[in-house]
Image (cartoon, helix red, strand yellow):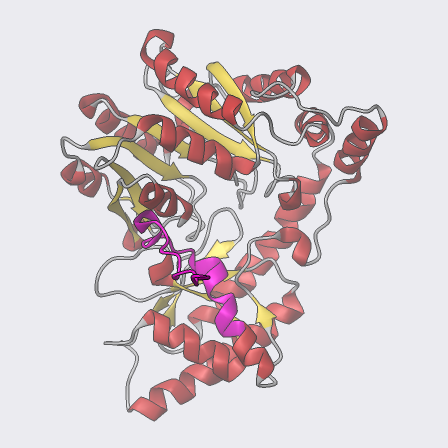
Amino acid sequence: MKKDFEPIKPAKRTEKIEYAVRDIVLVAEEARRKGKELLFLNIGDPVQYDFRTPEPLIEATYQAMCENLTGYSASEGVDEAICAIRKEAEKKGIKPVDIFITTGASEAIDFALTALVNEGENVLVPYPGYPLYTAILAKLCAFPNPYYLDEENAWQPDLADIEAKVNDKTRAIVIINPNNPTGAVYSEETLRGIIEIARKHQLVIFADEIYDKLVFDGKKHISIAALDPEVPVVTFNGLSKCYLAPGFRIGWGIVSGPWEVVKDFTEAIHKLARARLSTSHPKQYAIPVALNGNQVHIDEAIKKLERRRDLTVKMLNEIPGISCVKPEGAFYAFPRIDVPGVSDIEFVKELIAETGVVVVHGSGFGQKPGTAHFRVVFLPPEDILEKAYERIKDFMQKFLAKRGLKAA
């Protein structure tokens, strides 16, 4: 007798995996079906707007394919790319002891967390911060240990909160600098404070620097690994953001610190890299072209983004019930909803349904209890941003009036 399959039960490790940036698209599609014109301020993909991947990166990849460099590469990456990454790291003051190339910075982060963290352990992660870290930790049956960024201090990490959150199961501190979703760029004082906490508690620092060249107003980005070569740090970067090539899925990790301290951990990372064979072979040849080549596209991108950042901050701060700290880097802002008792998720869902402006709820990135935020991406051209913020302004007036509420 033929027996029907029972529904397949997914692994419990997947239950807590959420990714707000993508999940909100389902809400947007419902709004589209109801006839709303969608304005996308939710995805941090420059080429979805008016940015283009630099031609030399495309040409380098095409040339590699023409030369039949389409088989597996060495698991850690090709020599030319590793040498370029090493040279770039040294220019920033980092002393690499190992470099590994991955399928996007996301895979480098996955490898580093998987190589370090055991079931039941925890990692200090910023709230707000990029949700990939909590998703990977859920997969590992480990735990995010949230520390808060201080909105009153330009979204700098709260060092006292980090110190207070460390326990005997804590293995590492994640920093995202420049930060996604706030656009904060961390000061040297803050970074040195994090180093001291890591040293005191024997923690690895995971430094996500994927936006390191997109810094505004003439400010300079500081790599935390450059401030102390004796502290174990894994620095993550890639081609997706600064080099406008997110679809290339090319990233890397740079391990620094005393070799005797990091060698076993580094070998564990390489075991994982070997198990997946290699990342895309031909696209690795875009790395030396990107890092060693003309950087004009970055200057052009910064000029565009500064104008769009300024427009974003001005228009959002003019809306009753919304306040926005000025971002110093990347291409995100994290405005606050200054309305008592409002759920950020319900606010965002209603905003999308009523206006078609697609943003992401702040709780998808983590936020202090009792606060509500949403993330906007200011990559679109100014006319699109103006239209979106005008819609948000009109929506906010109706939102408050309908509930008999007043802004804080």
> Does the magenta portion include 12?
yes
Residue 94 x %, y %? 47, 19
Name the image quarter holding residue 49. Answer: bottom right
Question: Is residue 90 toward the left or the right of residue 113 in the image?
Answer: right
Res. 136 in view:
yes
Q: Which residues are magenta?
A: 1-28
Q: Residue furthest front?
A: 1
Question: Is residue 406 toward the left or the right of residue 79 in the image?
Answer: left
Q: Residue furthest right?
A: 66
Residue drawn at the location 59% of the way across and 81% of the way down: 33
Magenta: predominant secondary structure element? loop
Name the image quarter holding residue 102. Answer: top right
Residue 99 x %, y %? 52, 19
Residue 296 x %, y %? 72, 38
In this rendering, the answer to whether 242 lies above or below 293 is below
The answer to which of 26 and 55 lies nearer the viewer is 26
**Considering the image in quadrants, where does the C terminus appear?**
bottom left
